[in-house]
Image: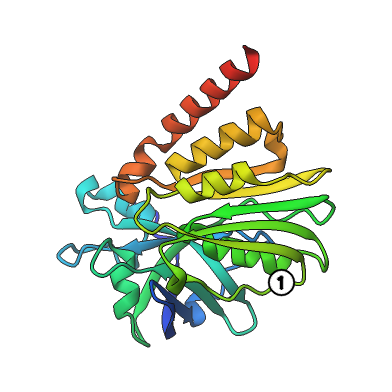
Amino acid sequence: MPDTRVDHHQGIVQRTERISRHMVRVVVGGEGLAHFSTDGCTDHYVKLVFPYEDVDYPRPFSMKTCRETMPRAHWPRLRTYTVRAWDPDALELTLDFVVHGDEGLAGPWAAQAAPGDELIMLGPGGGYAPDPDAAWHLLVGDESALPAIAAALEALPEGAPAHVFVEVDAPEDELKLETAADAHITWLYRGGRPVGEPLVAAVRALEFPGGDVHAFVHGEAGFVKELRRFLRLERGVGLDRLSISGYWRLGVDDEAWRAVKSDWNRQVEAEEAAAIAS
């Protein structure tokens, strides 16, 4: 008999707000989040569940049951999003979505979301929070990493030195970032250039302060790979001081990227190890 225990959280849209030209904030809440919890990471993420409209799913809903009893083509689609904020007292979860018209799945949903809409999610996961004892912090990312960077800035101790590089398409995509840290925040504008090109140039040009750095570098996989090689091989940053991952990959959707991400990461690690050994 299928295991029908609840393996997800259900939020109800409370309100939405367009916080920049291409970013929509959605706040979900309700008793369906009563068992949701976080543990202090600033990169907590959830996997949003988007069922197909013409498919009948198990009742009560269960991703485990879907995977055990349904053809793979009928499994709900998943999209990964950073938890921008979580208020356990109000049972309210805030998610920020990059929206480019009708492109993608989650972005169009967020653009049209209205109070009362349901959102099913799995998680949360996560593994990074800025080390308060680090000599300085490096935060780097494109729009997809902006919610996590904003959360990290809010968590940094007062006066903590930080260099922050955020790449967006244009000045209209900037957000106000709050922090008590001594943060030098640089907004980089893509302006038609390849994703990540301005970020790579800016990080390479940075005069690194002395002392132990704790770094967070996330976004499109191509530039993440390039910056990982730079930080590991040229700057000698240890893996234990580096949170780095490709949140997405140019030219493929989330399902396709998840299918190859583990192999891609292993290849990157093998290339890195060979370079270190040579």
Q: Is residue 72 above or below residue 165?
A: above
- Identify the residue shown where x is 34% and y is 50%: 254
Viewer-closest of 228 and 49: 228
Q: Is residue 106 left or right of residue 15?
A: left
Instruction: Examine the rendering and report whether any part of residue 46 can be seen.
Output: no
Question: Is 137 or 163 nearer to us in this picture?
Answer: 163
Query: Residue 37: x and y, percent?
Result: 61, 67
- Residue 277 at least partly seen: yes
Q: Is residue 174 above or below residue 228?
A: below
Q: Residue at x 42, y 66 (%)?
A: 170
Find residue 158 and report its image quarter.
Answer: bottom right
**Label 1 Cα crowd, 10 Å radius (few <14 / some 14-19 / many 20+):** some
Q: Which residue: 63% across, 77% down?
A: 88
Residue 249, position as x, y percentages in the image: 38, 45
Please identify the quarter of the rendering in which residue 80 is found.
bottom left
> Of 139 and 34, which appears nearest the observer?
139
Q: Amino acid at mark 1?
A: Thr
What count of labels does the image hold? 1
State the SS at label 1. loop
Furthest toward the left, the residue is: 54
Above or below, comparing residue 7 to residue 94 in the picture: above
The residue that label 1 is drawn on is 179
Question: As drawn, is 94 to the left or to the right of 242?
Answer: left
Q: Quadrant of the C terminus?
A: top right
Residue lying farthest to the top in this orientation: 278
Tell me residue 34's x, y (percent): 56, 75
Quick check: 162 left or right of 166?
A: right
